[in-house]
Image: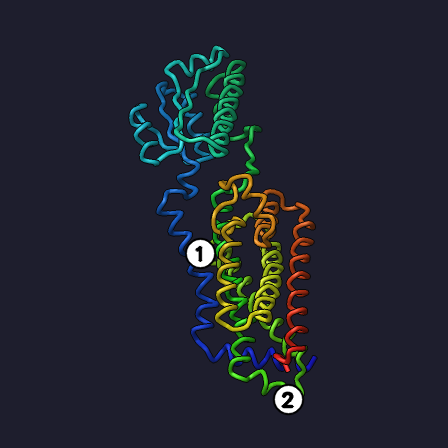
Amino acid sequence: MRDILWIIRERFIIWKSHPLQVLFLLGVPLLSIVMYLFIYNSSGTGSNNTLSIGIVDHDQSTYSQYFIDEFDKRVQVKELKSQKLADKAMADQQITATVILPENFSEKIRNEELAKISFRSFQAGEAIDALKATAKTVYNEVQTIAGFAAVSSEETAFDFAKENTPIRFHSFKKDTVSQEMTLQILGFMLLMLLYQSGNFGANSIQNERRNKIYHRLMTTPVSKNAYFVGTAVFAFLAMVFEVVFTVGLMTLAFHINIGLAAFQLIGMLAAFGLVAVAWSIAIGINSPSQSFASGVQSILFTITSLISGALIPNEIMPDFMKQVARITPQYWVLDGIKQLQNNGDANILINFVVLAAFLLLFFSISAYGFMKKKNLEVFD
C-alpha cells in the first residue's frame, strides 16, 4: 500500500510540474461549457426562443387579455397585430408558434360556446405538443372564469381569479433545452475524459518504458503490481477531479439546469472515468509503442463517441445505429443520465452493471497483456 501511495505522489509531482497539463485539465470543461452556451445562444435554440409563442388578439376583450396573461405565465408571449406579422416572426425564428384569437372570442366564451382558436407553427415535435396543451389549459381556465361570471359578475370573477383563484398550473416538465445542452456538454466531456485517461495512464506507462524510467523503478523496492495499480489510481483520481470540477462549473458558475442531482451526475461520470482508465491502460499495455497506442486510442475513442450519441444526438440516428450504440460504454452513461433527468428515482442498475462489465473486460485485457509481456521480459 505504501508503494502505491508513493507512485501516486510521484505522479502528482510530475503532473504538477507541467503547467500545460494542469491548464488542459482545467480548461477543457470550461471551454466545452462556453462553446455550447455560445452555440445554443447564437443558433436561437435557447429556452427563451424554444418555448415562445406569438398571439394575435382580434377580440381585444377582457377575456382575451386574461388568456394572454395566463399564457405568459407559462411561456414567453409576444403580442402581434396581424397574422402576416406572426408568419414573418415565425419565419425569422423569433417565435415557435402562433395562437390567433377570433373577434367573437369573448362572445363565444360568455355564451358557453366553443371559440375557434387557430394554432399555427412551422415545426413539429414535443415542444409544439406542449404549447398546444398549454393553450388548451389556458382556454379551460378562461371558460371557468366565465362560469363564475355567469352566477355573479365578470368583475367579481376576474378579481377572484387574480387574488384567490384555486386554479393553479404546476409544470413538472423540466427545461428540455437545458437538458439537451447538458447532454451535449457531457458527451464532449466523455470524449475528453477518454483522451485524458490516456495521458494520465497509458501514455505515462509508454513514456516511462521508452525513457527507461520503468526499468530504473524496478530496481527499487516498488513492485510491478504497485506500479500499475498506482498509475491507474492516480489516473482515476484525475478523472474524478475533472468530473467534480465540470459539474461544479455547470451548476454553480453557469447555473445550467442539469435536470438531476449533482451527486447522481458525478457518480455516473466517475464510473465512466474508471472505465476510461481501464480502457486506456488496456490499450497501452498491449501496444508495442506510444505512437501505436496513441493512434489506436484516437480511432477507438472518436468512433465510439460518434456512434454512442456523445457527439451526435442518438435520437437522430437510424434504428440500426441506435442498436450499435449499445456496444459502447458512453451510451450507457448518457442513457443513465437521460433516465435520471426524466425521473429522478429511475432504476439505472443495469447501466452500472454494463459499465462494470466493460471495466472487467478492459481489466482482463490489461492483465493478459501484462502477463504476456512479462513472459517476453518486456516488463522485467
> Residue at coordinates 40% horizontally, 47% vertically from top-left?
40
Towards the viewer: 127 or 373: 373
Quarter of the image with the N terminus is bottom right
Quadrant showing the C terminus = bottom right
The residue to which callout 2 is attached is 220
Q: Residues within 10 Å of mark 1 (few under 14, many from 20)?
A: many
Q: Position of residue 276 (x, y in %)?
A: 58, 62
- Report the amino acid beneath label 1: Ile
Which residue is pictured at 67% across the width and 69% down the height?
367
Q: Give SS at disc 1.
A: helix
Give the side of residue 372 with respect to residue 42, left or right: right
Residue sticking out furthest to the front = 376
As drawn, the label of residue 375 is none
What amino acid is at disc 2? Answer: Thr
Residue situated in front as seen by the camera: 45 or 76: 45
Numbered badge on residue 33: 1
Q: Earlier in the sequence, mark 2 or mark 1?
A: 1
> In the rendered view, would you say 73 is above or below 29?
above
Instruction: Locate residue 27, reporting x and y percent.
Output: 44, 65
